[in-house]
Image (cartoon, grey):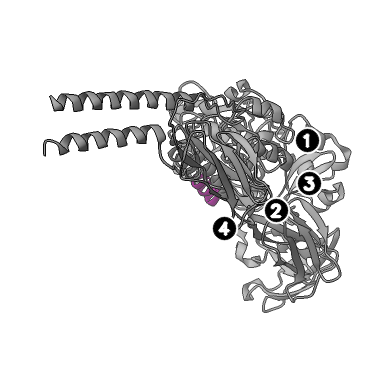
Amino acid sequence: MRKILPLLFGIFFVCFSFQIVFGENITCQEGTYLKNNSCVNYERVISLAPSITEIIYAINGQDNLIGVTIFCNYPEDAKSKTKIGGYVTPSIEKIISLNPDLVFAHDLTDPDDIKLLQDANITTIIINISSNIEGIYYNMRTIAKYLGKDSEGENLINNMKERIEKIKKVKSELIFSSPKMAQIVEADPLWVSGGNTFIDNIITTVGGINVYSDIYRWQPVSVETLITRDPDIIIASSGYMGEYNYILNNPNFKTLKAVKNNDVYNINEDIISRDGPRVIDALESVMGMIISYQYKHIPKYCMDDSDCTSGKCDSSIHICFKFKLNNESCVFDKECICENCENGVCKEKNSAGSLGISKSYGSGGNYGGGGGTSSVRYVDSSENIPVNVEENTFSSEIFNISEIFGLKQTLNLGGNFKETEITIKVKNETRKFKSDEKGDITLTIPDYGIAEITISKSGFKNFTKTINVYAGALNITKISGGEYGNEFKFKVTTKDGIPVKNAEVEIYGEKLKTDANGIVRTTIKTIRAGLEASVLANNYKSSSISFDVQAIGKLTINAPEKVKQGDTITITLMDENKKPVPNAKVTINGVEHTADTNGKIEYNVTTTSLILKAEMEGYISSEQISVVVEKETAIENKTTHNETKKDTSNDNLFSLQNLIIAVILIIALIIFLKWRKK
């Protein structure tokens, strides 16, 4: 037994030494990468969009942020970060020179630029523009995962959800109308926010109707369409383009209802154009506009507290009410009870001497929510009621149709609504109809498009609603294509299966026209889940589908599990079916190598460790693997590596330190064995 114990002790020391020196194969999960034989979160990050930058600050990840675009101006600290150009035209050379671990790109970033970053061995994650608030939450979770800020990301999301619930409470108690609204992105030429945008989601969430919800995302439109649709409220901004002033002063817009009634509202262009944490400020601002539109007699106040009864305000409109909202209180969770008021202006709860808006997002520190909200005017009156409200109001259920197919529609309003008049206006043509004794009414609609429906009856406040009138609904299906590089084929039909010719189909930014059989074809060279194909055609309801573009296969690396320093080894690149992949790229210790036509690379091992990763356009990249290298003799490493992603000097130092530790352990073992013999 006395002889066995030293032997076991020696085996333990030797195994422990080899484990330290040579390590083991490590596979890192998404959101982390391999560094010094450990999986770590990304530490040097670049943002290619202002919305991404704001999310990073909101989750307290700014210490890892080493570069931003020239448009990243919020919060204030973002202005001091290194600038790498615009989000559409970033400087790739500047980005690479900053030696980042990770770049968060935008889906407006040029795909060629993204490929250059990936070719430079920089992990690049594309953050898509959100079409709704849920999409913003998804982006926040993605960014938080890569920065190791999962809990901060969830705190931020929960905080936003709480504020949205408060907004919905205000809506249920104060909003009684559904005004038609338009958000002007640019006034000359005229661009607006359509459906499938987070701005459309904001408008509908607070009770409005986007008069351009029938167009896809952001589109240029004619001035004539704005005049025809004649929104009750126009949302504009006074950014560098000055849309707000342009709309007020341009003679082409003077006949608009919103202009004549002073219902053109100015809003900070950043909070209405960025799908980030301040989207909640945009929600509050737009609801403030609807409240101001309804309660005309209540003074409007701007960001600087000046009287804005003209409606020409520099920011959103917030109003303090003394009724409905539980005693005296302001909308949006601000206080207007006496001890918290100064000259009738509401302040933030628990604030001390400041009327500025500052919101805290979760546990991630203070992230200013201003830049778009304003002080709230307290109106000390018991007459805070909507103007021009008659004794009776139609229920919104009386006309709960949001769209009509065809130019003829028969309705039943019920026996209580006989002799009720319905007026329909489409493209400047107006028709009037009256229900019979049973409340039945047949509408013959003048034309397809946006129809304004007004229901009138003696003793009731007029009920007005905007609906879409379509000839039919489109249907788009993918009939072939699945992998990277395939020809994808899509077919557009009516719901009855009739092919639609010359319909416009947009697929991954490419606009195509259907042929006589309703078919479009395109070759897609990208790997992405959830791509969208959308279709538009005159007088038809648009449609879209999501589809996935799959990889040709997944790369695997076939390399010896254990090699000796000085050996020449063969590395084979294969797909998951064990078929060789020619011309694949393999990064070996940070240096890129290209496989031959048989998918093979001959490599002479001169280093003390091997870290391998394979990439190939159209394939899912391999997992990063490490290969054990046995060092038999002291061979000086004369290989230099031009790494673009990470500095390997720390890894080499780490290996040298481990080697010294191993030698010391072995010497200690020899001394111990000699002592045992004595």
Amino acid type, residue under disc 4 in the picture: Lys
| Circle 4 SS class | loop
Please check the rendered image and state whether residue 137 is part of the magenta-colored stretch, yes or no: no
Q: Residue at x 60, y 58 (%)?
A: 579
Question: Could you classify mark 3 by the number of other residues whose Cα lies within 10 Å: few (under 14), some (14-19), or many (20 or more)?
Answer: some
Q: Residue at x 31, y 23 (%)?
A: 664
Q: Give the CA separation, mark 1 to mark 3.
A: 17 Å
Horizontal side, residue 585 vs residue 421: left or right: left
Which mark is first along the chain, 2 or 1? 2
Residue at the far front: name it: 677
| Circle 1 SS class | helix
Residue bearing the label numbered 1? 243
- Residue 391 picture quarter: bottom right
Look at the image and give the residue range highlighted in magenta.
164-174
Horizontal side, residue 359 vs residue 475: left or right: left
Residue bearing the label numbered 2? 195
Q: Nearer the viewer, mark 1 or mark 3?
A: 1
